[in-house]
Image (cartoon, rainbow, N blue to C red):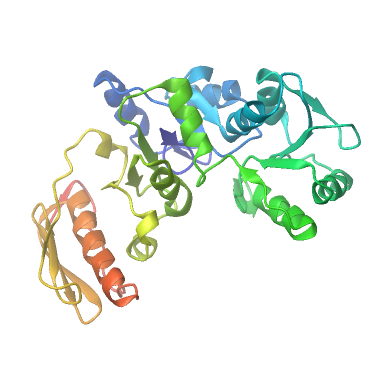
Amino acid sequence: MLDLDGVVYVGGEAVPGAPEHLERARDAGMRLAFITNNASRTPATVAEHLSRLGVPAEPEDVVTSAQAAARLLADRLPAGARVVLLGAAGLEEAVRSAGLTPVGVEDEADALVTGYGPDVLWRDIMRAAVRVREGLWWVASNTDLSIPTAYGAAPGHGVLVETVQRFSGVDPVVAGKPQRPLLDETVRRVGGERPLMVGDRLDTDIAGARRAGIDSLLVLTGVTGLAELVAARPEERPTYLAPDLRGLLEPHPEVVLDGDPAGGSAQAGGWTAHMTSGTVRVEGAGSVADWWRAVAVTAWRHLDAVGEPVDVAGLEPPTGGDAG
């Protein structure tokens, strides 16, 4: 289960090497699903975008938070139930496909569903907030506070969610990551005996996988860097770690711990990361991936023991396939 932005592509371009790595993964027998918290685009639109970037995909390979939200609604409401919809085309298509009827904010309804939509009107948000306060059941596609745009990060659907929450005093049922409905919906639609969530964000992709009880692979082609990684809380720590999607195709050696948390070490491949006075020192040689693994495990053990992240100032990750 592949997150998109920061994993498969960044902005309008494929992550370097991602199409080739994913082609090899398919050749090895892996079934790929592309999942996104973005509720505005339809699966067909996402699949077309991926295919243009050299990652062949069909609409049935894509699962969105809009589809997960529609599933939550359909599981509780009768067929044809009327649902106030604040969002874009992807959310409307998902709601209709689930056998439900989208209606306006003034219409009689059984529920409200919200998702990102650039054309959602403030007057409709106000009316929906009043109806939620009066008792209308509310499902939110996600709570992402920001979205990437051509002009930088901009307010996401989570800002609308917070606005309605504060006014109504009501928390919605949330479909997208880090909540588990999106991952559950992906497994239901796509199948797979050993699901693996692949993402670049600790607080959504990895935390969502842990909530769903499935393994995760963190890649470092998106928003997570060294400072974020060493400060990860237990509920945000991945099962596997790799610089990029090549990690789908390579063995992940066990990281061997030695000594006490405050001053011990971790060894991965040819690298050994030592903990000394709150800082990490690394020696040895080997793959870049193993360097990151040794540092991460050392830092997490220290964080759990003393409650403070390690100091990584001056610690430079190696580059290239192998380093010394």
Residue 217 vertical position relative to residue 170 in the rendered view, above or below: above
Quadrant in which the C terminus is drawn: bottom left
Tell me how many marks there are.
Answer: 0
Q: Within the image, what quadrant is residue 95 found in?
A: top right
Q: Is residue 209 left or right of residue 60?
A: left
Residue 122, x across and y down, in percent: 85, 48
Q: Is residue 179 left or right of residue 77?
A: left
Q: Within the image, what quadrant is residue 316 found in?
A: bottom left
Q: What residue is at 71 percent from the left and 19 percent from the top?
A: 79
Nearer to me, 115 or 173 = 173
Nearer to me, 185 or 156 = 185
Q: Is residue 69 left or right of residue 295?
A: right
Quadrant in which the N terminus is drawn: top left
Residue 198, x across and y down, in percent: 37, 39
Observer able to see residue 202: yes
Q: What residue is at 66 percent from the left and 30 percent from the top?
A: 76
Q: Within the image, what quadrant is residue 91 found in?
A: top right
Nearer to me, 235 or 312 = 235
Observer able to see residue 86: no
Q: Residue furthest bottom?
A: 277
Residue 46, x across and y down, in percent: 55, 27
Q: What residue is at 62 percent from the left and 26 percent from the top?
A: 42
Q: What residue is at 66 percent from the left and 34 percent from the top?
A: 40
Residue 272, x across and y down, in percent: 11, 63
Q: Is residue 122 left or right of residue 148?
A: right
Q: Residue furthest right?
A: 106
